[in-house]
Amino acid sequence: MKRLLIPLAAVGLSAAVLAAPASAEPHWATDNLLPKPADAYGAAYFWLDANGAALRKATQYRVDAKDVPKLVSSGSQGAPDGKPGMTGPTTAAKPAASKNVNLPKTIGKVFFLDKGGNYRWCSATSIQSRHRNLVATAGHCVYENSKDDVYDKWVFVPGYYQGKAPWGVYAGAYAFTHFDLDTYDDYDGDYAFVAVHNGFALAGEKEVTRNAFKAWAGDKWIKPREIDAEGYRKCLINLGDCWSEGEDKPADLVGPDYPGAALEKVEVSKEAYTEAKTGRGQGFKFGDPVVEQVSKDEWDAYKGLGDKGAGPDKVGNYTITHYYTQKWVKPGTSRKYYEAHYFIGIAKDLGRLGDVVGGQGFAWNQPLGQPVTVFGYPSAPHPDGDRPFSGVTPKWCAGKTNTKSYQVNMFKVETHQVLKCSMTAGADGGPWLMKYNNGKRTGYVNGVTSMFHDNDGNNRIDYISSAIFDGETAAVYDKANYAETKSIVGPNGELLK
């Protein structure tokens, strides 16, 4: 790695500790993704809702297949900056043996919204860590043009297939990457380790009382049910949540003493409510103002008559206050009446990522020329337009990396390791596994796919490249290794604080 000349100690790893003065600039940078359970729940639900519609809508991160840089040999052996080291993988279950290359249970896709609001994905893997909660991927799959600018609604879905999340969704809490990528957009540090919350899956819905609905901090919604005029009248008397639909003619408007007159509530502005009289007359106040707790997105999008206030209250909740006046109409009009029924979404906690799917090992300061097996979800076409990959299922390449490091003049790359491989974009972030054991489906992550190259000029991808994992990478990993996360839903599916 260039510029930073003093290696940071990889404390707590199996390699020998490296000495560094206290004043040395740190090699790692960290940013929050979704540390709060409510935000993490909202992001995971966003991707799971409607049977994974958002997951299926997403496209691979890179869309311009023709923007393919060439590799230039640096002539360097990619000398390590310290002693080599490894941490061993963990497994969740013993897989069946096979003569073919077995796909690791740890690999999957990360999903996020880019700054244009587009639904995107990259490849990634679960990696061994102290708290069994770590994901390894490319740095550009977490940061947009670096500069502390992380993507929104970032989640990891191990084993992803056609909109399905067989082992749950894991929302990102904290991202860790190299200081040079975060600060200078330097692709020699194009990797990231993300600490994720416990996984969860949606487990259906449950109808609850109005009070339980108001108290529920997780996902919830109201379903209308049609009632008759008498049921509507009783609902209004009891200050229930009910409404009518249809247009009243002026001749249908009557006073409260008209025989069989039906009472309706009409939402008005705060000013109109303040000016309205109190009592039973036409246009008088209908009960007290109603405060509705909403999400930040709902609060931003609201265009109704209610009072949004200036922002979140003292405990961070977003609310809208609604105001109603009375309307009395003749009985037997062609209106329809509805009452609200309250439902909450139930989610199931699936536990820590590493306990569910295991975690690959991690290796650094290894010599180039190592045999590696690379996994990913390629999807983009080749520069010539041919599209052999769908991005639906993971693919793999295997071989030895080049013995010399390479530069990429179009990007800030001075030392990348390269592998002959035809996988295209979408495989970004996929793991480069040394010593891959086909029976155990585990190995040691010694790189992640960063870039794609057409070096023979035939408009087909023929090489992929990765940052070289050195002592500085170990320092970033070690920092992420200590990040603690939590469950976001409780044993009854409730959202935790």
Image: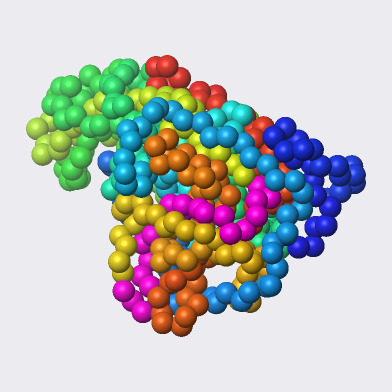
Q: Which residues are magenta?
A: 364-386
Residue 409 visible, this orientation: yes
Main SS category, magenta section: loop
Asked if 44 appears above or below 110 in the picture, the reply is above
Q: Tell me residue 493's x, y (percent).
A: 40, 21
Question: Does the segment drawn in magenta span residue 335?
Answer: no
Q: Tell me residue 17's x, y (percent).
A: 79, 38
Question: On the rendered image, what quadrant is the N terminus found in?
Answer: bottom right
Residue that appears at 15% across and 22% down: 230
Asked whether 57 or 454 is in front, the reply is 454
Q: Tell me residue 490's x, y (percent).
A: 45, 19
Residue that appears at 18% across and 22% down: 231
Asked whether 319 or 72 is in front, the reply is 72
Q: How many numbered marks appear?
A: 0
Residue that appears at 12% across and 30% down: 331
Task: Please tell me in which quadrant of the rendered image residue 486 appears.
Answer: top right
Question: Does the segment drawn in magenta span residue 372?
Answer: yes
Residue that appears at 54% across and 75% down: 69
Asked whether 375 or 276 is in front, the reply is 375
Q: Answer left or right for 207 relative to 180.
A: left
Q: Answer left or right for 352 relative to 83.
A: left
Asked if 301 appears above or below 242 in the picture, the reply is below
